[in-house]
Image (tube, grey):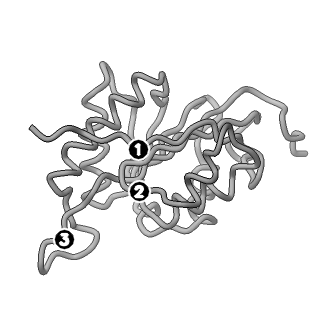
Amino acid sequence: MRAPAGVGPLRRLVVLRHAKSAWPPGVADHERPLAPRGRRDAPAAGRALAEADRLPDLALCSTAVRARQTWELASTQWGTPPPVRFDPRLYAADVPELLHVVREVPPDVATLLLVGHNPGLEDLVLDLAGDDLGDALGQVRAKFPTSAIADLTWHGPTWRDLTPGTALLTSVTVPRGRKE
């Protein structure tokens, strides 16, 4: 039997779109690295997560080079990075596939970081958010750019109980690094 919505511990899903990638000629999409701007923005995303006290208990990251580099540069901004799982299913995933992967997360994980790609991540945020604070949903509908971070909270006994429209979109930020 499924627990009713709103029952269970507070859980947080932090969605991070990979930083700006390069488009080198002859390089397959999965192998594209970060562009110089992405190399600046990814650490800024890590700092933003730390400053907002949104550090995850577990990270799930696409196997694409640009997503892995985003994770590596962001997580260096934290004292002790959490465990990370690189999952090939997150590359080019749509909402049903993303939800399938998230629902496999162990129930002892309270805060989960998902590092991946658009349009799947943007669609996931819009699908899960039943409400928002301010105009976060409007911001995501307008654009969910590279390095964007969406913070969704919900109550549920396990990650299997996360369903469309049950989360609160508490914030959307787009950290940018500085040119040196």
Q: Residues within 10 Å of mark 2 (few under 14, many from 20)?
A: some
Q: Give amino acid for label 1.
A: Val
Q: Secondary structure at mark 2?
A: loop
How far apart, in angstroms, are the residues tagged by discs 2 and 1?
7 Å
State how many labels appear: 3
Q: Which residue is identified by label 3?
A: 23
Q: Where does residue 34 sit, x and y in percent of width and height? A: 20, 56
Residue topped by disc 1: 174
In the picture shown, does residue 6 fall above or below 88?
above
User: Pointer 3: residues within 10 angstroms few (<14), some, or many (20+)?
Assistant: some
| Residue 110 locus on image (x, y percent) | 60, 29
Closer to the N terminus: mark 3 or mark 1? 3
Given contact means CB atoms under 8 Å apart, are the residues at marks 2 and 1 in contact? yes
Q: State which quarter of the image contains the C terminus.
A: top left
Count residues near mark 1 (Cα–Cα under 10 Å), then give few for <14, some for 14-19, many for 20+: some
Q: Residue furthest bottom?
A: 26
| Nearest to viewer (mark 3 / mark 1) | 1
**Any mark on residue 145, and which?**
2
Among the 4 quarters of the image, the one containing residue 132: top right
Percent from the top left, x then y, of residue 76? 25, 30
Residue drawn 56% across the image and 59% down it: 98
Say which mark, if any, is on residue 36.
none
Residue 45 found in image quarter: top left
Q: Say which element carries label 1.
A: loop
